[in-house]
Image: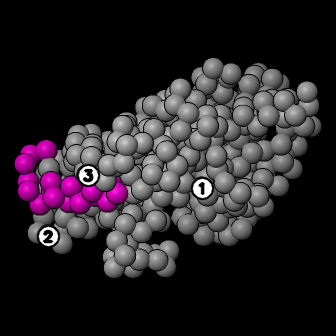
């Protein structure tokens, strides 16, 4: 059994996941995102307490933590944008100090998008694929890599942060400080903003979201279709560039924007043919994510599982 946490701006979820990837016990509490670092840590402890009360707790061999980022897996710290009190917070150390953790069970920290990649490679759309980019396209844009059949989070845990590569050298400033970042074109926020700027408006009483733009696009609204086409073209450029560097075979896309279905994927695949032109990337395949529910928890468990297996091989 593997214990897993998934920490985000609205909820802190925990689960026990078995060797086959099945969630056998699950719990969650609201994230006190505007409260103190101590209050946040106590909420994490409460989730662990609930997991420890389950009969399967005694068989836990590894512990994975997926967190909103930025993260620093080398230092074991997190600084989630949507949790202001946690800046370089030593989350790994805090979890390790919980009295219910067994000796030898060291927490493994990873970012939430990397956790999604781990989950999709273990059980989802990247299963059986040796080299994949898995992306979350939602309010922001993030990602993670599987290379040579293994999750590759990089030295600080941020490899695959595709939302902050530039797809337009003279593009608009990004909140990260660079210009023309993919996130500024492809995120749900960017899609809705661009649609509004071109004269689109949602149905009366509906908020101006990417989902509302997608509904208008399905109804044939040209401005909504153009907003998704712009997003898809930026995504295609970033994915093709990544594939050219790393010989990615498959790109898996999840998150709220991906739930628009062919509204996103049809223009994305069309534009990808324009950018992925070299022989070794021409066969690049784009797939929707398969694990919408609990992907963070399953990915955290997958990382813990990989860590335990590597420790076993090292011992041999």
Q: Is the magenta stretch mostly helix, strand or loop?
A: helix
As rendered, which of 50 and 186 lies closer to the eye? 186
User: What secondary structure is found at the residue carrying circle 1?
Assistant: loop
Which of labels 3 and 2 is toward the front?
Answer: 3
Q: Quadrant of the N terminus?
A: top right
Residue at 84% x, 48% y: name it. Answer: 96
Which comes before the other along the chain, label 1 or label 3?
1
Q: How far apart are marks 1 and 3 (CA)?
A: 26 Å
Cα separation, mark 3 vs mark 2, equals 25 Å
Q: Which region shows up in magenta? A: 218-237
Residue designated by label 3 = 274
Judge from the rendering whether residue 39 lies leftward or rightward of residue 116; answer left or right.
right
Q: Mark 2 points at which residue?
A: 198
Q: Residues within 10 Å of mark 2 (few under 14, many from 20)?
A: few
Front residue (pair 74, 314):
314
Judged by depth in the image, the label closer to the viewer, 1 or 3, is: 3
Question: What percent of the width, then of the height, locates residue 102?
Answer: 88, 35
Q: Between disc 3 and disc 2, whose residue precedes?
A: 2
Give the x, y percent position of residue 189: 33, 63
């Amino acid at each position: 059994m593997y214990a897993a946490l998934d920490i985000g701006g609205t909820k802190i979820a925990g689960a026990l996941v078995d060797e086959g990837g099945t969630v056998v016990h699950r719990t969650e509490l609201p994230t006190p995102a505007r409260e103190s670092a101590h209050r946040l840590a106590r909420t994490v402890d409460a989730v662990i307490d609930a997991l420890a009360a389950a009969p399967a707790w005694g068989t836990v061999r590894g512990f994975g933590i997926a967190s909103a980022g930025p993260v620093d897996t080398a230092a074991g710290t997190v600084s989630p944008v949507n949790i202001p009190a946690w800046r370089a917070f030593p989350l790994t150390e805090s979890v390790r100090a919980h009295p219910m953790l067994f000796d030898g069970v060291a927490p493994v920290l990873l970012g939430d998008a990397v956790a999604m990649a781990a989950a999709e490679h273990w059980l989802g759309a990247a299963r059986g694929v040796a080299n994949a980019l898995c992306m979350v396209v939602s309010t922001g844009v993030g990602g993670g890599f599987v290379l040579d059949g293994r999750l590759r989070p990089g030295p600080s845990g941020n490899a695959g942060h595709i939302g902050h590569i530039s797809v337009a050298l003279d593009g608009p400033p990004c909140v990260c400080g660079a210009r023309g970042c993919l996130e500024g074109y492809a995120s749900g926020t960017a899609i809705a903003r661009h649609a509004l700027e071109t004269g689109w408006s949602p149905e009366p009483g509906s908020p101006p979201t990417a989902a509302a733009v997608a509904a208008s696009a399905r109804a044939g609204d040209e401005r909504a279709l153009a907003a998704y086409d712009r997003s898809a073209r930026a995504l295609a450029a970033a994915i093709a560039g990544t594939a050219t560097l790393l010989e990615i075979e498959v790109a898996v896309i999840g998150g709220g924007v991906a739930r628009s279905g062919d509204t996103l994927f049809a223009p994305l695949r069309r534009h990808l043919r324009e950018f992925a032109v070299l022989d070794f990337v021409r066969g690049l395949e784009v797939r929707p994510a398969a694990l919408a529910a609990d992907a963070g928890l399953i990915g955290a468990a997958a990382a813990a599982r990989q860590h335990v297996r590597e420790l076993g091989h090292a011992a041999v």
